[in-house]
Amino acid sequence: MAKGQFSLVVALYNVADYVPTFLKSLEIQSYPVNDLDIVVIDDGSTDESAGLVAQWAERRPNVRLVRKTNGGPGSARNAALDLVRNSWVTFCDPDDAFHPHYFERIADFLARDTQQSAQMLTGRLVQFNDSSLQTSQGHLLNRKFRSGDLLVDLDLNPEYIHMHGPTTFLRREVLEAHHLRFDERIRPKFEDANLIGRYLAVVDRPVVGLVASASYYYRRQRQGGTSLVQGAWSDPRAYSDLPEHGWLGMLQAVRESAGRVPHWAQYLVLYDLVWFYIDDKRMHSDTGSATPEQQATMHRLLEHIIALIDQEVIDTFSVVSQGWLFHNILRSHYKGLRDADPMVVEGTTDPTQQVTTYHYLYQDGLPQEEFVVNGAPQAPVSAKVMEHRVLGRVLIRERILVLPSGEETRILINGAAATITTGRGAPLQAGRKPLPASYLQLASGQATHRSTSTSAAGRATRQLARARASFTVRRVLTGSSPSRTAATAAQRILHRQLTAAKAKQRSAADRALIRQAHTEQVRARYKDAWLLMDRIDRADDNAEHLYRYLLKHRPDINAFFVIEEDCPDWHRLQAEGFRLVPYGSDESVLLVLNASYKLSSHANWNVEFPVSRERFGDGEAKFVYLQHGVIKDDMSRWINGKNIAVMVTTTQGEHESIAGDNSVYRLSGHEAKLVGLPRYDALRAAALAAPAEERRNILIAPTWRQYVKKVIEVCETPAEAAVAFEATDFGANWMALLRSAELKELSVNSGLSVVFMPHPEFEFVVPYLDLPEYVQPARYRDVSVQEELTKAHTMITDHSSIAFDAAYSGSNVIYMQFDGDEIFRGKHVYRKGYFDYELHGFGPVTPDGDGALQELKRIVAGGSVREQLYEERVRGTFPFWDSRSCERITVAVENLGRPWNQQYSLEALPDETGHTK
């Protein structure tokens, strides 16, 4: 019989790499480890996990190891709950670790709870990175520990919820009296919170003891994969078992036990729901993998779940920010609430264009609107309706208006004057302190007697204590000896000191550079500058083509091109007369801080902000997104987070999908401009000089896959990456096509060359692939893409947007889509957009290499002339065939410097004198 107060329930499954750290952290506890009742349930591990625990338990009668077939963590924990003996039960994970004083401080807290009010105890969750061992206490639910050790009644302060089983202690007598166990149906997460909720519903008062002084180390970002919680939305059960048995099941069980659904129970569910919504808004969210059936199931269950959440909770919950949108989705979509007084949010004002952006949310049909600016009726400069979809369903609509700026603006919605505000009305409660009560008193103890002195001696004492704590934590997490840990700590301290000294020097140099940027000489050089760039290390895209147009036709524009000085394109552009600025140089800082516009074919953070924002600020330049290609998929989750002043669109379908009503993009016609890609001017001229029937190349150019990238980027060498690439379904299909005997025969008999040009994400493996002798490898960095397109009579791709370029250049197109729409269901970063390959594509769609080869033979036999169906589609897709895209873009950018009512029309371009053509 274990003599202590605590029973540890440990569900063990395939964590042999981490078990030694976990066991070591138990060995060095200041609380007697032999007084802990430790029940380990091996849930069918196939590695050495159970053997390591068995060896450790040989001389410890208080440790019991039980083996069972795999049933999941809930099943394992339930098996252990039938065996535990002590008063308080906790559910720790064997890939985590404890602070050396963890159990001692929990015990000390219990001793200070003289009235035995606490029905549940919680330690502090400290996350640590698996590889760097860097720790963080930034978890949002850790804010409740800011005031130190406390007793809190959740009926009084529901915002002090706790959801993490491994840092939770529950009374065994309550668990046994009410037959409380984990619900094994709940996957892939929330099983802890579900039990906690049902547990708190049966106690007299839901009083939680917050033991801020007890730290539990939770492993994040495992080297060998992800935890059960990480990547939860890739699990199909997240759309059925989780909402039905986890969220809804807990709320219903609590109501049955307590006769009501307390706010703290609603908080547990709403916290998880907010994070679901936040995750769904990420570009790479696994929610994109949900099938229509899973989406429908989730929506059906959410209706029942949110029906059990009170309006008062929705209007006050701020444990994590609901955000303006989700807060209003809960109120208007799920609760059916409509505000009598409409609210309009005032956004940004552009003083140069003299316009202001406004937003409001609504359900049902578009309301009647009236706009009055400075006492006179005014039509919007631009207006659109944006749809906010969650799991494929529109839950709310946002009206986005661009109005002329004025001293006084009135907006009437359905005849009622709207309240115009800069606040969005989402609830925000500054951290409330727990409400006092006589039963929430802690006696003084060791944890309350820490030094708070502001003297030098007090500060030194605290610094020494933190250093000792850091030393101890490192020793626990690494499993190193004290001497080895001390040596490593000394190296870290020296490294920090050297880093701090370098940072101080750099800060001084940065301040000098900023002062230089504001000197008259520098301002004169970069006055009204246009900063153009493609990729950091590569040109040959839309920025290069636009710069070449400016160089030839608009020398009055103060344009500069930014690129890395040691990249292959530098000398080529320099010889052509480009004014080049090295990326990352001091000169680039001077340019950025004075430029009026930044124009790029890419919008990655290090292109959108070519110099450090932290060191030099954002600058005043407006960002013009020239685009890398035609958007056909749903990229809204990425683009909506960008501050884009002008965005180039090329086809009517693309433009409507972005700027049109009921799209999922935030941009309206005020920002999105249908002007055509800059590179299409030269592409059109090159295509006319090389008719498709005279071309002799077959270009095979697949796009990339996120899952393949993850496989190959962890390989140590490119050769290993090439092997891994071929082992994937993606690589195997494309290599089978390239090695096909039929392709070789067609190539030889028809005098055709086969060129393999995969996406740049994969091109580093190309030299290491075993390609047939008749296949010519090509890498984007080594070739001109436009030349490859205009030498190809046919291009075979899968979902690449380069098919638009190929079609525009006159090439035939074949789509080989062996994974069909699966690319939109978690295998890649794409979400399905407006473009349907069968209805809108520029060539036949085939499911495999055999189909692609049959289509290729048919095209070759037909003289390589594009079929009438696809020719009509191409002609109907692209509105511009005049090689004037660069001209239109230049006008669109110059319009950013003019008031809205003095801007040139892009349909009637001005000539050099300012007269329209």
Image (cartoon, grey):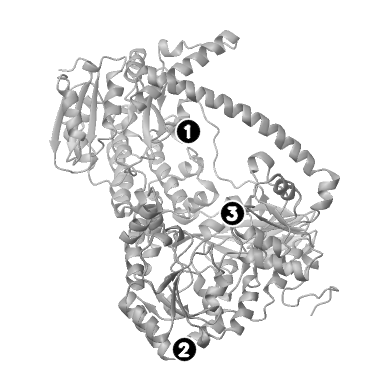
**x then y, percent, for residue 322:** 50, 45
Tell me how far mark 1 sits from mark 3, CA to CA: 39 Å
The residue nearer to you, when weighing 879 against 416, is: 879
Query: Relative to 540, is 882 above or below?
Result: below
Q: Is residue 416 visible?
A: no
Q: Residue at x 56, y 83 (%)?
A: 876
Q: CA distance from mark 2 to mark 1?
A: 60 Å
Amino acid type, residue under disc 1 in the picture? Gly
Spot occupied by residue 184 in the image (x, y as percentages of width and height): 22, 43
Residue corresponding to mark 2: 867
Q: Mark 3: which amino acid?
A: Ala
Q: Is residue 691 above or below residue 471?
A: below
Quarter occupied by residue 382: bottom right
**Label 2 is placed on what type of residue?**
Glu
Answer above or below: position of 343 versus 812: above
Look at 39% across and 23% down and name the residue there.
473
Residues 626 and 260: in front is 626
**Which element is circle 2 on?**
loop
Q: Earlier in the sequence, mark 2 or mark 1?
A: 1
- The quarter of the displayed image where residue 31 is located: top left
Q: Which mark is residue 138?
A: 1
Say the numbered circle drawn on residue 163: none
Quarter of the picture holding the N terminus: top left
Q: Would you call the spot at circle 3 few (<14 residues within 10 Å), some (14-19), or many (20 or more)?
A: few
Name the one closer to the observer, 589 or 901. 589
Q: Nearer the viewer, mark 2 or mark 1?
A: 2
Foreground pick, 180 / 839: 839
Q: Is residue 257 left or right of residue 787?
A: left
- Return the x and y of residue 902 as percentages of the image width and height: 81, 67
Q: Mark 2, mark 3: which one is toward the viewer?
A: 2
Q: Give the residue number, with chain letter if any, for mark 3.
A: 340
